[in-house]
Image (cartoon, helix red, strand yellow):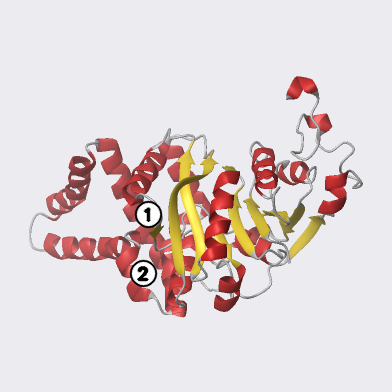
């Protein structure tokens, strides 16, 4: 068994994948390990670039199965590591964090996973700015037990085996929370370090373009899908206490039901207009930004609509094998010594140099 498996989940990450793979290879340089690129049927050059490195590359058989929860579980089907790190294709992993996380897992056997600080490299939209603020509020000195490891973490394989699967393939989002809830329900701990784990190169999109992207990708179905997962995993009470957007989504329906009842008595148009304006004004005051207030309220309503659809969607078994193709594999020992077929020219034609090969002096 390898010490570490790093699963890189990708979908159309041609501009980022080389950086992610190189950082993952650097992070396992001191360990017996492997890097697995789990691709959700990309339509760009992601897979072609990933194949230039000493990695295994697996591709989702059907694009209709794309979910945020699919990538980690797809990689898990192929990995062999004692510890497993989940890395997004637009992230760059910090090798120093991996060393510290491994040390904690080696010494503290009740810890199932270790995460760290996600450094956002782009904060040019309201969603990312809000994410940074939320993480800053959650950070503490030294290590801290947390509900889940958002943005990735290093997990103990034995703990994952105990709860049955790594990631719920049915989820369009919140897959890290679902994993954390199941691990905690089985008695495991999750630890968040103050140390930086990754640099995150997120979408180059404005606020409203990103919101529309979320709609098209099905992300707003995730509240309902998570509620269904919580019913199956018997953690609904915990979910309602810990994931704010779920009770908010339910609350939106209750709010508008009350508003419609009140509108029946007098001045229905005015009553509904006031009902629409109250949450926007309240959030604008709270966030000190009209744009952020409006963005928040629109997000709540999209999540509320998606909640109903997500609850009603059919689920497949999270344990079911995900149909996929292994399109590339490598004997790492051969690659490290220059005996593997990848060594001779991997990446040279594109200017991408694997971390284990010698780069021309002009590129160093």
User: In the displayed image of the protein, which residue is found farthest to the top?
Assistant: 362
- Nearer to us in this view, 337 or 277: 337
Rendered residue at 62%/65% (across/down): 73
Expressed as whole percent of the image width and height from the top left, the position of residue 207 reads 41, 37
Instruction: Judge whether residue 68 can be spotted in this image.
Output: no
In the rendered image, residue 44, in percent from the top left (x then y), is placed at 70, 42
Asked whether 316 or 27 is in front, the reply is 27
Mark identifier at residue 239 = 2
Q: Is 230 displayed left or right of 55 in the figure?
A: left
Find numbered disc 1 in the image and state the secondary structure of the residue it sits on.
helix
> Looking at the image, is 52 positioned above or below residue 109?
above
Residue drawn at x 78%, y 40% as measured from the top left: 356
Count of numbered circles in the view: 2
Compared across the picture, whether 232 is left or right of 254 comes to: right
* Vertical relation: 204 (above or below) 152: above
Residue at (29%, 37%) from the top-left corner? 291
Mark 2 residue element: helix
Name the quadrant containing residue 69: bottom right
Q: Does residue 340 appear left or right of residue 31 in this picture?
A: right
Q: Image height check: is 185 above or below 337?
A: below
Q: Residues within 10 Å of mark 2 (few under 14, many from 20)?
A: many
Could you tell me which quadrant the N terminus lies in? bottom right
Q: Quadrant of the C terminus?
A: top right
- Give residue 19's position: percent from left, percent from top: 65, 38
Residue 302 is labelled as 1
Residue neighbourhood size for the residue with mark 1, other residues' Cα within 10 Å, grouped as few (<14), some (14–19), many (≥20): some
Residue 345 picture quarter: top right
Task: Say whether residue 249 is left or right of residue 113.
Answer: left
Return the disc, 2 or 1, that comes first in the chain's sequence: 2
From the viewer's perspective, is residue 238 above or below residue 15?
below
The numbered mark at residue 281 is: none
């Amino acid at each position: 068994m390898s010490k570490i498996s790093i699963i890189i989940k990708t979908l159309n990450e041609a501009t980022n994948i080389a950086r992610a793979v190189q950082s993952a290879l650097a992070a396992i340089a001191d360990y017996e390990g492997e890097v697995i690129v789990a691709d959700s049927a990309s339509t760009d050059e992601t897979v072609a670039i990933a194949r230039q490195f000493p990695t295994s590359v697996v591709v989702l058989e059907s694009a209709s199965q794309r979910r945020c929860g699919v990538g980690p579980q797809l990689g898990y089907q192929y990995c062999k590591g004692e510890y497993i790190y989940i890395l997004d294709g637009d992230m760059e992993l910090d090798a120093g964090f991996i060393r510290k996380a491994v040390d904690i897992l080696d010494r503290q056997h009740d810890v199932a996973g270790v995460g760290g600080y996600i450094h956002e490299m782009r904060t040019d939209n309201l969603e990312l700015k809000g994410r940074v603020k939320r993480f800053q509020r959650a950070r503490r000195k030294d290590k801290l037990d947390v509900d889940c490891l958002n943005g990735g973490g290093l997990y103990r394989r034995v703990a994952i085996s105990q709860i049955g699967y790594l990631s719920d393939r049915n989820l369009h989002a919140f897959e890290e929370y679902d994993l954390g809830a199941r691990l905690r329900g089985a008695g495991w701990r999750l630890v968040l370090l103050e140390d930086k784990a990754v640099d995150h190169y997120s979408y180059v999109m404005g606020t409203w373009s990103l919101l529309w992207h979320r709609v098209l990708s099905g992300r707003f179905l995730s509240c309902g899908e998570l509620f269904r997962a919580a019913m199956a995993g018997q953690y609904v009470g915990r979910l309602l206490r810990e994931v704010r957007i779920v009770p908010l989504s339910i609350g939106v329906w209750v709010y508008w039901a009350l508003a419609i009842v009140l509108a029946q008595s007098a001045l229905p148009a005015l009553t509904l207009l006031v009902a629409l304006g109250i949450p926007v004004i309240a959030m604008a005051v709270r966030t000190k930004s009209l744009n952020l207030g409006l963005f928040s309220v629109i997000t709540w309503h999209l999540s509320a609509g998606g909640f109903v659809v997500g609850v009603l969607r059919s689920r497949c078994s999270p344990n079911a094998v995900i149909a996929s193709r292994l399109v590339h594999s490598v004997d790492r020992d051969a690659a490290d010594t220059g005996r593997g077929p990848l060594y001779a020219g991997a990446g040279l034609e594109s200017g991408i140099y694997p971390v284990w090969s010698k780069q021309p002096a002009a590129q160093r």
